[in-house]
Image (cartoon, rainbow, N blue to C red):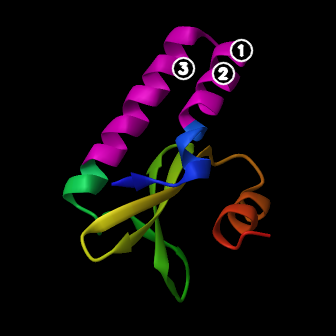
Amino acid sequence: MLLTEDASSDPDELYNVIATHDTPSKAEYVLDRTRKVMEILSSFPERGSYLALGVREYRQTFFKPYRVICRVIDDRVDVYLIVDGRRDMQALLQRRLLGS
């Protein structure tokens, strides 16, 4: 599994937001669950749903409301985004996946 440069800072960002607006223990819990989701993706890269109808290049796996957005290339999983799904997903995806 490979975390893109942008995705590598996502867990810290998630932790800080959750710890600030909830509690550090809740932030740890969310990070632990997202790590487990990524471990499962390492073993089962085809897990999850397609990001959009007709677009089979990217997949998403949920730990609601959090999402892990990735691309499966052969047996490798490249993680592009680890995010709270309540954010402006269109803008985030456009910036991360399309580089705009």
Q: Crowding at label 3, few (<14), some or many (≥20) Cα neighbours within 10 Å?
A: many
Position in image of residue 33 (x %, y %): 39, 33
Magenta segment: does it hold 22? Answer: yes
Task: Please give left or right for residue 21 compared with residue 4 in the image.
Answer: right
Label 3, label 2: how many angstroms apart (C-alpha)? 8 Å
Q: In this figure, which residue is indicated by the disc labeled 3?
A: 27
Check the image and report above or below for 44 versus 73. Answer: above
Circle 1 residues within 10 Å: few <14, some 14–19, many ≥20: few
Q: Residue at x 28, y 64 (%)?
A: 45
Q: Nearer the viewer, residue 49 or 68?
A: 68
Which residue type carries mark 2?
A: Asn
Residue 20 % position (x, y): 71, 14
Mark 2 touches mark 1? (CB < 8 Å): yes
Which label sits on residue 16?
Answer: 2
Residue 15 screen position, x and y as percent: 59, 24
Tag 1: residue type?
Thr
- Distance, label 2 to label 1, CA atoms, is 6 Å
Region of the chain picked out in magenta, as a range: 11-39
